[in-house]
Amino acid sequence: MTATQPLSSAPALDRIRVGSAPDSWGVWFPDDPRQVPWERFLDEVTQAGYSWIELGPYGYLPTDPARLADEVGRRELQVSAGTVFTALHRGPSVWDATWEHVAQVAELTRAMGAKHLVVIPAFWRDDKTAELIESPELTAAQWRDLAGGMERLGRKVRERFGLDIVVHPHADTHIDGEENVARFLDATDSDLVGLCLDTGHYAYCGGDNLKLIETYGERIGYLHLKQVDPEILADVVRNEVPFGPAVGRGVMCEPPNGVPELEPVLAAAQRLGIDLFAIVEQDMYPCPPDKPFPIAERTRRFLRTCGA
């Protein structure tokens, strides 16, 4: 290799801003003794080479805006988004409680200078016990409530906080694989409701990430980067293992050891011609406290070889 040759043949992804999240440190809950302290997460995500982070579950990081701004600022970090959980398919009766939660998170998100709110639909399994909470299938009326409620949420979040919502398809929710994601997108206003494409969750649920970007590229406003181990996934599908226990088996794996291949996904996202956050999330709750950092560091190095 001569001095003028690039280190990687991958094209520069100048529209993609890479970050990480508490999820990549095994954090799923605001407070859990099996999770690393928030100070350690902030220190290690910086050391691993990331400059953008998400807030994670509300209450994990400090919720006082001044304190959080100081903590991220002195580590030269910036916040890309907050995250909320909603159950809007349950109809108008849940709106007030939903908005109370959303407004709280959106206020902190805006205070941190972020512009996106990641919206995760409710699980139909309990995320700790894996017990069935409700039917995995929605009725036609519930689909209408979900679509209408999400449009209402997108409109109000933008009017009140100046943020854009991006809905996150997720395993063990009603917005998961290709059929349900397409149904949801076709039922919602593209001006009010964007998509957070989580490459791992979409692959976990049988979806083709490149096809989704090609078909619904105008809806994509945010990315989560993760991969699944195809051998573990095959066993999970065969034995109908819930998502939580599947994570415990290691179904979400360290890049580049799984699927989908991230380099072509990132290249396709770059071709959309818009600025996009690409936030690394490797689900591994619960995990030993020393496990996340070296994975995060290696993943950052890998993404540089992809041009990000």
Image: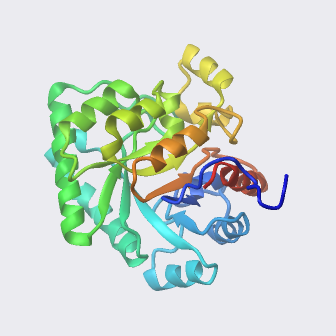
**Residue at image location 39% in from the left, 56% down from the top:** 274
- The location of residue 143, given as percent across then percent down, is 20, 33
93 in relation to 6, above or below? above
Dividing the picture into quadrants, the one containing residue 248 is top right
Total marks in image: 0
**Residue at image location 65% in from the left, 56% down from the top:** 35
Q: Is residue 150 left or right of residue 82?
A: left
Report the residue that reaches farthest toward the top. Answer: 238
Q: Is residue 182 left or right of residue 96?
A: right
196 in relation to 165, above or below? above
Question: Residue 114, can we see it?
Answer: yes
**Residue at image location 45% in from the left, 37% down from the top:** 126
Q: Is residue 150 left or right of residue 118?
A: left
- The location of residue 269, given as percent across then percent down, is 46, 46
Quarter of the image that includes the C terminus: bottom right
**Residue at image location 58% in from the left, 58% down from the top:** 22
Q: Nearer the viewer, residue 1 or 235?
A: 1
Q: Nearer the viewer, residue 25 or 281?
A: 281
210 in relation to 93, above or below? above
Q: Is residue 252 left or right of residue 221?
A: right
- The location of residue 28, given as percent across then percent down, is 55, 51
| Structure colour scheme | rainbow
Question: Residue 135, can we see it?
Answer: no
Report the residue that reaches farthest toward the right. Answer: 1
- The location of residue 131, given as percent across then percent down, is 47, 30
